[in-house]
Image (cartoon, helix red, strand yellow):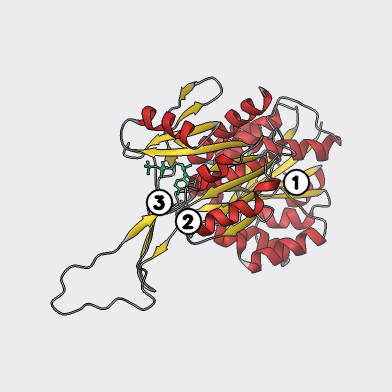
Amino acid sequence: MKNVVVGVTGGIACYKVADLVSKLKKHDINVDVIMTESACEFVNPLTFRTLSKNPVVTSTFAVPEAWKVGHISLAQKADVMLIAPATANVIGKVANGIADDMLTTTIMACKAKIVFAPAMNVNMYENPILQENIEKLKRLGYMFVEPGAGLLACGDVGKGRMAEPAEIEAFVLDLLYGEYQDGSADKVEKDLAGKRFLVTAGPTVEDIDPVRYISNRSSGKMGFAIAEAARARGAEVTLVCGPVKLTCSEDIRRIDVKTTKDMLAACESVFDDIDVVVKAAAPADFYVVNQSEHKMKKVPGQDNVTIELAKNPDVIATLGKKKGDRILVGFAAETRDLEKYAREKIVSKNLDMIVANDVSAPGAGFNHDTNIITVFKAVDSSKTVYDKMSKVQAADVILDNVVEIIKNR
Ligand code: CTP
């Protein structure tokens, strides 16, 4: 029987590791769990004791009575040692030779394969100190299951979410048996491999003068989630985005733009090499004609100022006119008559599919982490209504529909 020692450190992803331990147990693997003090704040050791069917070690001095193994014997017993979730703290300690509790002493004494599954806030993950620690550990032969990007528990979107239990399970099984043994775990299927995606996200900004602008409430979260999900499913992704406070995976080609005209130019510059366009951005529909070169000053006695707006190009409709074999997916943000407007936009913009949402509904639309979407397809005039879900889940649902369109062609 193979032995896996799971080190659980303090992060909200602890609860996912409970699932992971039970997945490993189903492969008839003996699992011993070591929890740090802060991990015990997130999940009660009893949970891991019940799932692993083994006593749980919580500190150097509290090794269970009936189970006289210290850190050395656990370290020797392990075929694989997995630290999940791995905080910036434990990565930093191990990288710098600190062994001040049961977990870090066991890691230091362990000669088996050691795998970290990091989980933390995106800014912590991007911190150069952490990145240096990871690089050092990798150089020394420690392994990492990369965190995913998406919506984090802290509300930020970016890289830092612990890899899914199924992915870590597959990684560990691979290390133990040399190949993936069990087809039951749902690894991310690379069903978009070879497809080239152009995703747009966020608002665009039109200047009134050097200090004032018009824009809209789009956060970019939906588009970023789609870009990340497409990447995870094997697509090559270009992301054109307006000003947003979000980060994306390094292997996404990101082009930052400001105005709607910039967005169109960026999209057109890559369009030839694209198979699927997902237009989740909310480009400003109007630009300021009488944009002022200098800051507009208040003129005494002049109470009204007129800003003249003119129509911007419609980015997706422009691409729609020369779409060829490409698949074009648009969005429709409405506050009433959702179906009527969505169906009209499919025709007027020459789309294959539109994702409509009522932005006035609670939990949908701009700046929320959730969305309530209805998908309309051109090919069969179908309409599918989905329940409220996270934007990360919605991204996969949208891509499932794209895969269906590709398959039925
Ligand atoms: N869109 C675009 N360029 C614009 C405006 C919108 O590419 N200048 C795209 C959006 O990215 C989205 C779709 O068109 O995929 C629908 O956007 P929406 O704001 O709902 O509709 P509009 O076409 O702007 O129409 P209206 O504002 O009249 O509802």
How many circles with numbers are drawn on the protein? 3
- Circle 2 is placed at which residue position? 260
Residue drawn at (57%, 44%) of the image: 319
**Nearer to me, 155 or 79:** 155
- Circle 1 is placed at which residue position? 81
N-terminal label among 1 and 2: 1
Q: Quadrant of residue 320?
A: top right
Q: Decide if ligand 1 comes within 8 Å of the CB at mark 2.
A: yes
**Vertical position of residue 204 compared to residue 185: above or below:** below
* Residue 362 % position (x, y): 32, 38
**Vertical position of residue 32 compared to residue 107: above or below:** above
Q: Is mark 2 on a helix, strand or loop?
A: helix
Q: Quadrant of residue 188?
A: top right
Q: Which residue lies furthest to the right in this view?
A: 178
Indicate which disc residue 217 carries. none
Is there a contact, CB below 8 Å, between mark 3 and mark 2?
yes
Three-letter residue code for mark 1: Met
Q: Decide if ligand 1 comes within 8 Å of the CB at mark 3.
A: yes
